[in-house]
Amino acid sequence: MADKVAYLGPKASYTHQATLQHFPTPAHTLDPSPSISSVFTSVQSSKTKYGVVPFENSSNGAVLPTLDLFATLPTTNPDVTIIGEEFVSVKHCLLGRLVARPSPSPSKPVKLSASGIRDGRVTTTEGSDPAVRSPPLSSSATPPAADLSGLKVLHTHPQAWGQITRFLASLPPGVEKLDSSSTSAAAAKVAKLAAGSADGTTSEAAIASRLAGEVYGLDVLREGINDRVGNVTRFFVLGRRDDVTDGSGSGTASGERQAGKEGGARKTRTKTLLHFRVPSHENPGALADALAVFKKWGLSLTSFYTRPEPEVADATEGRDGEGGQGKEGAMEEAGEEAQDGNRWRYIFFVEFASEVGQEEAVAAALEELRGVSRGLAVVGRWGSK
């Protein structure tokens, strides 16, 4: 029986592309989810064995809903961990149907597979993913510089707005911007609006990939509208802690493609993501003391993010294998802090890399970090891509 994989859908989202890269079909059954939180819940409840969520973009930084879910992981989804990563080139397009197509072509199926995605375009119909009926794009239907004067509403995922700021500044005044759960959800919505109109057009458009345009039968009104060339999003592959095959958390479960399997150097590097709080925000150098631990033990930081501390503090220590105070202790501590009237407290996310032979240094660093921080939780360890 094929393992199920949850991802932020619907079909043709950038997360879908990352999922196809990591999990070949038909060895896996892909299950589109309506939100990032539902992907976490799906893995926690064992509805699916794996999940794929966006984590950060090279132009616009962290995907905040994912960070916030990691912040509450020990108390809300304690069995979920990171087991891998994928990188997807993000080339945003403006998709819509501002003008009617003069002569619609017969619909044909578009099937998505790992081998079928090249730079966000469908190049083959191989694979077991269910087909989506979509009219093909043509140069006559997608003029290189469509008139955007009739554009009234724009839909996309919140993360995308910060990646297309120059394009947004070029739009006609008064265009309304509405958030969608994903870029492909935005494309699907616009396609539905166009299909429901008398002439097959709509004054609303979506920011998504060219692939989404092909899947949902929309015209590419503008292509490559992201601010930076080389725009890339990193995705995390989620699994259950009891399925991880080695003690470090960097291994993979049976049937999953080994992260970092290709390429010599990739086999020897492991990444770890953890989060912690400082004992007191009023003590000068409290955060510096925590970060100094990584330098002392020769561990290179690969990312660092800060988020407001969750309402129920995640003080469940020992997600790396040692006991902690648990959910009840975390709630009690959070209640005490609330009674004291403390505000502006933060949780710090640190990702670091280690090489083969640094296992003792990693263990020592975590032990020392536990002494100068509180609420230490290791979110996951995985083979670096």
Image: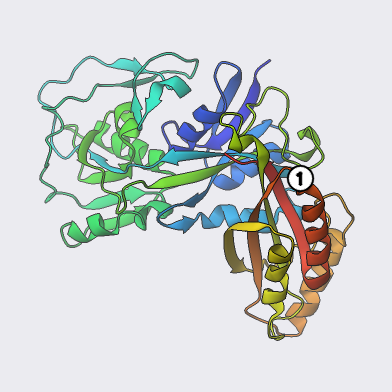
Residue 124, percent across and down? 37, 16
Residue 292, percent across and down? 70, 70
Q: Quadrant of residue 297?
A: bottom right
Residue 51 in sight: no
**Which residue in the structure is indicated by mark 1?**
357
* SS under mark 1: loop
* Residue 178 against residue 187 in the figure, above or below: below
Q: Residue at x 20, y 62 (%)?
A: 174
The foreground one among 162 and 105 is 162
Q: Residue at x 90, y 55 (%)?
A: 323
Q: Residue at x 27, y 57 (%)?
A: 176
Q: Quadrant of residue 376?
A: bottom right
Q: Residue at x 44, y 31 (%)?
A: 11
Image quadrant containing the C terminus:
top right
* Residue 147 against residue 21 in the figure, above or below: below
Q: Which amino acid type is shown beneath numbered disc 1?
A: Gly
Left or right placement of residue 19 versus residue 365 in this view: left
Image quadrant containing the N terminus:
top right
Residue 9, percent across and down? 48, 36
* Residue 131 against residue 119 in the figure, above or below: above
Residue 323 in sight: yes
